[in-house]
Amino acid sequence: MTGTPRAHAKEAAETEAVGDPGENPRVRRSPISFAGTFALASALFGPVSLGADARKVEAGARLLEAQRYREALDTLQGAVQADPANARAAALYGRAFLEENDVGRAVEWLEKASLLDSSSSSTAYWLGRAYGEQAIHGNVVVRAKLAGKIKRAFERAVELDPDNMDARIGLVEFYLQAPSFMGGSFEKARQQTDELRRRDPLHGYLAKARLEEHRKRRDLAEAQYEAAMRDFPGRPEPYYWRERGAIGRKDWPSALEAMDRLLRQRPEDAEPLYEIGRIAALSGRDLDRGEASLRHYLEHAPRGDEPSLAEAHMRMAEIEERRGTRAAARSEYAAALELDPGIAGARQALAKLR
């Protein structure tokens, strides 16, 4: 299962929002999404109801995959108007709103999709994600109200499909991050980890590492990531998991090392180039290398859950701000907005540079 909302930019997990609002709700590789991650395949390519305008639904799915989110919204609007009872069209429409950071509309349509098809694990999972996005924006009272919805949505996703590993990782994160009075439980996180290790050894390593990180046992967590790299040499996810942990500690050399190792393993991948630029933007280090990596990434055509070109321009703008080159930063923010008028933070950052 793959796919995730964009805004790789500044990491903040939906479930983390129960305890910490984070910096930016649009997250690609948050702790939940470290599963590698997300249920895009089933969301995009599940069965279509017979009464639906199938061509519009399929076109909307393809536009989502190609990160053409505004066009996807327009197309899927026609699909849900043509067949209001089509659960898949409603779920995709909600996904598109989530990608565009319109969290209220995302929840509205994903709830509707869940009512139309209560048997969809993918829809339940994405609804949990959307509730998590709402929690990020909310105060403590709002988060407390949403905690149960997040938990129930992920639990329902697992109940419907025990092999929905993204939902299981979501539960691990929820149980670790939420206070006990909101449903958090280390023991339940451990139980989910045991089940993940049985069903999917790769993501079992992730879950075990998250348990160790939660207990501040960094060395043991690192050992889990290294074991995942060793046992699954062709998979990129463990490198990103390790990078995320290093960024969380502001251990910039270790974060960069993880991406360098991934590039050596998979030199054809473009996403590590984006990550090198993001590390530079976050840390203020290796700015020249970060810029060069992002310029290389901008020659790439992202698909699926890869960072968008608009996000790459955002990172370029942040690098220019680090350098104090305000005109160049304004130009990069403007380029990001031209590609994605709804990208979080760009308009505000541009206004500060006027």
Image (spheres, rainbow, N blue to C red):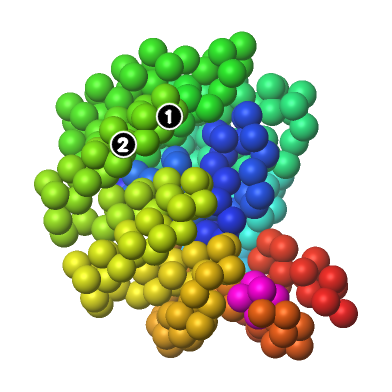
Q: Secondary structure at mark 1?
A: loop
From the viewer's perspective, is residue 125 above or below residue 149?
Answer: below
**Quarter of the image where one finds residue 210:** top left
Q: Amino acid at mark 1?
A: Lys
> Magenta part of the protein: which range?
318-322
Residue 162 belongs to the span the image colors magenta: no
Label 1: few (<14), some (14–19) or many (≥20) C-alpha neighbours in 10 Å: few
Residue 208 visible in the current orientation? yes
Where residue 49 sits in the image (x, y, percent)?
A: 42, 48
Residue 320 belongs to the span the image colors magenta: yes
**Residue at screen point 47% across, 15% down:** 185
- Marks 1 and 2 sit apart, C-alpha to C-alpha, by 9 Å
Where residue 208 sits in the image (x, y, percent)?
A: 30, 30
Which residue is tagged 1? 216
Q: Amino acid at mark 2?
A: Asp
Where residue 293 sits in the image (x, y, percent)?
A: 43, 80
**Residue at screen point 42% across, 46% down:** 245
Relative depth, front residue between 352 and 250? 250
From the viewer's perspective, is 15 left or right of 66?
A: right
From the viewer's perspective, is residue 334 above or below residue 126?
Answer: below
**Residue at screen point 37% across, 30% down:** 217
Q: Residue at the right extreme?
A: 354
From the viewer's perspective, is 205 left or right of 57?
A: left
From the viewer's perspective, is 338 left or right of 62?
A: right
Q: Secondary structure at mark 2?
A: helix
Where residue 97 sits in the image (x, y, percent)?
A: 62, 55
From the viewer's perspective, is residue 160 above or below residue 232?
Answer: above
From the viewer's perspective, is residue 289 above or below residue 221?
Answer: below
Which residue is tagged 2? 219
**Residue at screen point 87% across, 80% down:** 354
